[in-house]
Image: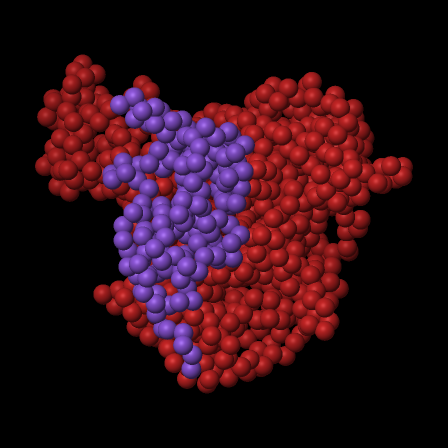
Amino acid sequence: MSAIPERVHLDYMVNGEPSPVSFAPYKTLLEVLREDLNLTGTKHGCELGECGACTVLLDGQPVLSCLVLALECGGRRIETIEGLARGPELHPLQAAFADFGGSQCGYCTPGVIMTAKALLDKDLNVTKEQIKEATAGNLCRCTGYLQITEAITDAARVMREEKRGEERK
Amino acid sequence: MNKKHLEVVGKPRRRVDARAKVTGALRFADDLSLPRMLHCKLLRSPHPHAMVVSIDTAKAERHPGVHLVLTKKDFPVPFGIMPVAVDEFPLTDHARHVGDPVAAVVAMDEQTADFALGLLEVKYEKLKTISDPEEALNSPEPRIHEYGEQGNIHRNQSYEFGDVDEALAKSDHVFEDLFFYQGNTHLPMEQQATLANLEGDGKLLVTSSTQNPHYLHRQLARVLQIPEARIRVIATPNGGGFGGKCDPANHEMVVAKAALVLGRPVKIGLTREEVFYQHRGRHPVLMKMRTGVTKDGKLPAMHLQTLLDGGGYGSHGPASTFYTGVLTPVTYELPRFKFEACRTFTNKPACGPKRGHGTPQPRFGQEVQLDKIAEKLRMDPAELRLGMVTKANSLTANWLNVGSTALVQCINEVVARSDWKNKFGKMKEGRGVGLACSTYMCGAGLPIYWNKLPHSGVQLLLDRSGQVTVYCGATEIGQGSDDVLATIVAEVLGIDTGLVRCVTGDTGITPVDLGSYSSRVTIMMGNAAVQAAERVRAQLADAVAEKLEVLPDHLIFSGGKVFHPANADGISFREAVEMAEGKFGTIGAVGSYSPPRPPGRYKGSGVGPSPAYSFSACVVEVEVDPNTGWIEVPKIWIAHDIGRTLNPVLARGQVIGGVYMGLSEALMEEQAFRRLPEKLSSALVHKMPSMLEYKSLTALDMPDVDVALIEDPDPNCPFGAKEVGQGPLLPVMPALANAIFDAVGVRVDEIPVTPDKVLRALELKSKGLTPRVGPDHFPSVPYPEPVYVITPEEGGDGKESKKEERKRASAAVV
């Protein structure tokens, strides 16, 4: 009927690990992560690019994985919430979300944490306004956002201290 | 045996489920999959009101990969959350709104199921659409449902507590105002999902994002006609609920049936558009308030009339109808109260319970009316309210027991913290502050179906390892109920929450808890947990006392140890459990809780009573651009009478989250509908069933919120802790509307308060007309003859009165 294959095979690089995966070519990155790689930490809230719940990092940039065609992601660097913790230790963003109440139902949490990671990876000296602007595309119905902003602010502080510690070494 | 200080309660802590949430490890319903799992999709009606004449399923059934097609004929038995409104079929042959499910396809994957929906050939016979309550009142035919009061009136009721006309006639002023509160939806981040399968023992397991696994369990048994004991419901952690996952839902019934028929796991996940059709959100309510006022600022009486747009199904509507009035007299003294309410069916997705369930609408009306009263009497709105707040432990005109109240402290707190006295009426044009208060229940006093059983059960199991497992049917919907459970058990046993494992929301293994609704979990589950933990503690104390040769009552459980005050070394909690296990055998206990019997005895008095009420006060500051009507909110101050704070991180989060949701409703959220052009179909469709078009506040829009938690422990509540999940939402909307009046001198008597309405009101003002935007008439509603109840103050007995008693009572007062 057509030349479209039933499945395609690509070599993904997910959370620093080679992750070969086969999937139906119509799938979005979100679907492949959740359904074919069993990385269900990345959530869906609308599948139309409206809510930010599915945010992952693609080559370091936050993207809405529901709007990214999975076919386009071969060989690219994909980061998801599952890859954030440092072994058994939480990433400072994760620890701060837990300590400051940045996560209530937890459904928007992976997406907003990944958005925040991209922000802090670029600049640890972010202002509150920059944090709000960066996370404005991640809807949250529980927290009222303030505790998310507080958590990211504190994580940036912790990460700045870590960085200074490393520089002193 | 009591510790001097609380060790866990009141201390800021990571919630017990925080790690799972921040690592993405927490499994929501749609994160689950099973081998051989099939996928289900629902075909939804494109017509707002139509009969399904026929469905030809042959093509869909023949399509490769399709395993099953279900229609109405597979579901002869209806369901409904309330016994008086059992009016839904999982798949219907009478579509009552656009999006009403009429058929289901189960296939190898979502893609195939979705494709096969298009192969179903459905013949509809369109019926006249009823689009709003006024049309429903004027159009008894065609009936959307065959039950209800009459025509398209679902519920219609009238109550009079004391002679209201007489009190209004004697008042110095009577304020008559109309208000409208537009409907809005929960918009939980998680779309509903359900997975059904047969377990190894042959029982049906339904795993679902539901707030109320117990009610779902009962309704599944009803619809599927199999015994409850052969069904297990697991409520997965909900990705937000806010009331939207309280009703048993069509999709849950459909996949359960499919799993039974096919003997394979079947899953469904709703799309975001479908979530808007599932709805069960805030009712649009039109209100008329006639309130008597004395010249010194008291309210002798109020006559409140409400008209609710219920949408296409009953849902929680009978309760919602009551809630548009019954809590009104709890906030301020109102010696006489007449309350008439009518809920109509319309051809829109069903309305139901959303955070605050029926009470935000009349609260908005009353608080804005109080602002108008204060203006007329030239009184400060805060002073006016301070002069009329209800007294602790008093009975309201409609026989509700106020219990403990810290509303006075709440008002004083927000007045002081916001610098109200230097701001109200004193800021530059365009800037203003508004104040409002509210009340909410700490759990409904009666269950949704009539029974005398406990509302919540908790079971504890301990063993020689020192671990404590606590079982409860309550559902974690993000509000922190697991953390509340762990906190309370840990506090009673003198251990850290890290030793407590919570197993919740599983009808197969946890004791019944009615569910996560009506702000009932902290109080009801909490009281049951205290009882269970105290029983276990007594067993441990007996064993340890024997060993230490002291009296059990003298032992203290604290810091992970059990000790006598004379020797703080004591023994470890783990050893104490081991001793008890040696002495008594396996260690465990159960606890349960039923709310106190309410004082009201009249028919209908069951809606409104609660073991306790929370109170809130709020000040909103706004800046209004007179050229565009644009509203900026720089800051909100809120004080909440929480009784006792169990975990300040979570409590503050609930307050800010409530303020956020209230402000978002106040400014922009609307579940609104429009007619398609005639050439398309004229169908009544949702204006914006998407998260982009259905506007809600983002991180950029959210103002600073100053939170004051007022602690005045309530004797009916565990460690005195009242609810915090719903109350703090309620005062935000009226406080915003009142602030706009202070800023630019215009009244917007409806929610949402949008820039276009502000601008319209400003134009009226500039033309010298009444600067008000809001409803202009209240239709004639055939409310019934009121149920007359003599108030407690006037010597009533809580029962409905006969006419002669009524005359006697009013004669006595005269």
Query: Between residues B712 and B399, which one lies in front from this camera angle?
Result: B712
Colouring: by chain
Colour chain B appears in:
red
Residue A104 visible from this viewpoint: no
For image coordinates 41% across by 59% down, the residue present is: A72
- Who is closer to the viewer here, A151 or B242? A151
Residue sitting at x 89%, y 37%: B768
Q: Could you say where residue B556 lies in the image, as x and y percent from the top left? A: 23, 23
Quadrant containing the C terminus of chain B in the rendered view: top right
Q: Nearer the viewer, residue B537 or B245?
A: B245
Q: Is residue A158 left or right of residue B754?
A: left
Q: Is residue B584 above or below residue B684?
A: above
Q: Residue B495 sits in which quadrant?
A: top left
Asked whether the viewer can see residue B541, the reply is: yes
Query: Does residue B15 appear to the left or right of B796 in the view shown?
Result: left
Chain A painted colour: purple
Q: How many marks?
A: 0
Q: Residue furthest top?
A: B566
In this orientation, which residue lies closer to the viewer: B775 or A21?
A: A21
* Position in image of residue B508 (x %, y %): 29, 56
